[in-house]
Image (spheres, rainbow, N blue to C red):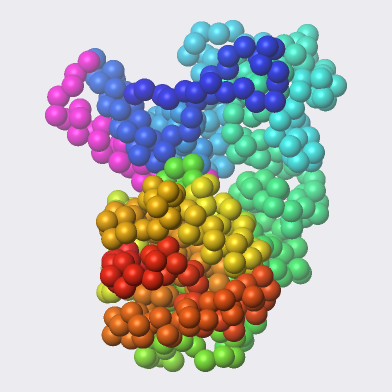
Amino acid sequence: MVIVVRLWMSSAPVDEVGVILKVLPFTLEQMKQFINSWYLQTEIRSRAGKNNQAVKAEAKKNAADLIDRIINNRAIADMATNPLLVTMIATVHYSGSALPGRRVELYQKICDLLLGTRQAAKKIKAPLTSEQNKSVLQVLALDLMQRETRTFAPAEVESLIDKELQTIVNITLTPGEFLEQVKDVSGLIVEREQDIFEFAHLSFQEYLAAAEVKELQQEQILIDNFDNSWWAETIRLYAAQSDATNLIQAALQNQTVASLTLAYDCLKESKKVELQTQRQLENILEAGLTSKDAKIAQIAAQVKLTRRLNNLLRINENQEIDQSYLIWAEYQEFIKDTFGTNTIEPGFLPVDAKNVSPIQSVTGISFQAANRFCAWLSLNSNFGNNLIRYRLPTEAEAKQYPAREEKPLTCWTQENRTDGEGIRVVKDQWPPQYRQLLEHLAAGNWREADEETAKMMLKVAKRESQGYLDIEAIDKFPCSDLRTIDQLWVQYSYGRFGFSVQKRIYEQKGKDYSAMYDALEWSSAYKWSQKFSDNEYKQAPLGHLPLTHTILQYHTNRMNTLLSRRDL
C-alpha cells in the first residue's frame, strides 16, 4: 500500500531543517484497506507462501474482526490513523486472535512491543530493558502532562531523564542517548521537527502518565484536575488500572455535565468502583433519563448527548459520523432551549409526543426540525467552536456507515427530506471559502452577510461579470455550496432565514411567487435593511433573508427554479 507523504516544515527555519517528510494520517477507508492487505500478507507468510482460497478467507475474517473492534472504540480508532500504530494494533490482534478486552491493556501491550519485542525481533541489543525504558518514559510523560504540552526539547527534560537514569544500576546512558535510542529503535518517541520531540501518539503520553500516577500513588493530582479537559484521558486510563471510587466521588460532589460525563467514562472502564458510588452515579445518568425530577433528567440527557458526540465514528481528519439514532431525552434539550415556554412550531414534535419514552429514538418529526437540531448543536459552545458544523448525513454517508441498531430507521439525510425517521449527525468543518459569511452571520451583521451571499453565489457560478444568475446557472449550482449557504443562514438566524425557509413559505403559498414575495415583504427590503446590524432581526418577516431575488433580477422563473430544487 502506498503511504502518502508531503513536505512538511513547521516553525524551524528552512535552511536548518532540510526536508522532513510527514506521513499523513489514514482515513477510515485507507485504514481498512491497510488492515486487509496486512492480514493477507501475514497469513501468506505464516503458511509458507500459500495463497489459496482458505488463506484468503482466514485473512478476510480476521481483518474484519479487527476493523470492527477498532471502529467500536473511539480512542483506538484515533490511534489507528497512524500507520505505525495500526501495524502494532494488528500485530497484537494477530498474536492473540483478538484485542485485549480493555484498551489500557492494549496500550500496555503496544508499549511492550515497541520497547522490547520489536527490538528483539530486530536483533538489537538494547542498553535498557522494556521495563527500565518504561520507567523513564513514565516520568517524562507525567512531566509533560503537568506542563500541559505534547512537545519538548531535549534540553528541557535533560535533568529529569538523567535523575531517573541514575536510579538504574550499571547504566551510563546519557539523556540524549536515551532519547535517540527510544526514537530510532522503538518509535515510541518521534522528532516532530529539528530538536522538537513528542510521543508518537498523545495516548501513549496519557497512558504512561497514568501509570506513573498509579506507581507514585498520587491520585490527588487527577482529582485536582478532574475539571481540566487536558487530563481527561489520563484520568480514564488511570481508572482502568485502579479503583476509580475517589475520582467518581469528586465528580458527584461537583455535578457538571463535563465532570459527570468523565465520571461515567471512568465507571465504564474502571478496574474497581465501590458499589454505593457505582449505584449513585447510575441513578443519575442511566435511570436519570426517565426520572420525574426535571433537574436529574436534564443533566442525564446532557451527559448522554455529550458522550454521543465524543464517540462519533472518525471517517477522516475532518469528518465524523454518528452510528446510533438520537433519543428523545437528548432531543428535548434542543426543544426546551429553542422554544422555552413559547409555542412549539409544527413538525418539531410528533402527534403522540406525550406518550413517547425518553429513551426511544426520535421519530415523527419534520426535516426542518432535524436540520434545526443540527444547527442548534453547531451553535452550542459545549459541543465545539464556530468552525465546527453538525449536519445531517448525505445518502451516501448514511449507506456507507450504517447505524448499528438492530432495527435501523430511515434516517433524515441531505437528500431525503420527506420520509425520514431517525436523526444521525455528521460532524465536520465549515468550508474555508465561507469563513467570511460565517463571521458576518455570527456577528449578526445581516446586511454584510446578505451581500457576501450574493458575492459567493456569483463566484461559485462564475457569473461575477454578469452580476446575476440565469436559469442554467441555477440548475447547475453545486448542491454542496447551496446547502452550505442555506445551513449557515438557518443556523445563525435560529431557523428564521435561509433558502429552505423561503422554499417552505413558497410551498405554503401554493408555489405562487407573488404571494411569497409579499409574505417575505421583499418590497420593504430597504426598511428592514436599516435593522440588519442590530438584534431586531426577529422583527423582519420569516424567510426575509437572504434577499435572493436581487441576484435573480426579480425574475419569476429563476426564483421558481431555485426554490424547486430538491436539495433545499
Can you see residue 360?
no
Q: Residue at x 51, y 66 (%)?
A: 489
The magenta span reads 49-75
**In the image: residue 142, left or right of residue 2:** right
Compared with 378, 181 (above or below) is above
**In the image: residue 336, left or right of residue 46:** right
Q: Position of residue 49 (x, y in %)?
A: 22, 15
Q: Position of residue 136 (x, y in %)?
A: 73, 25
Splitting the image into 4 quarters, where does residue 393 fall?
bottom left
Splitting the image into 4 quarters, where does residue 175 fall?
top right
Can you see residue 251?
yes
Compared with 246, 369 (above or below) is below
Q: Residue at x 49, y 45 (%)?
A: 318
* Depth order, front residue of 307/29: 29
Q: Residue at x 80, y 38 (%)?
A: 147
Q: Is residue 345 magenta?
A: no
* Depth order, front residue of 228/537: 537
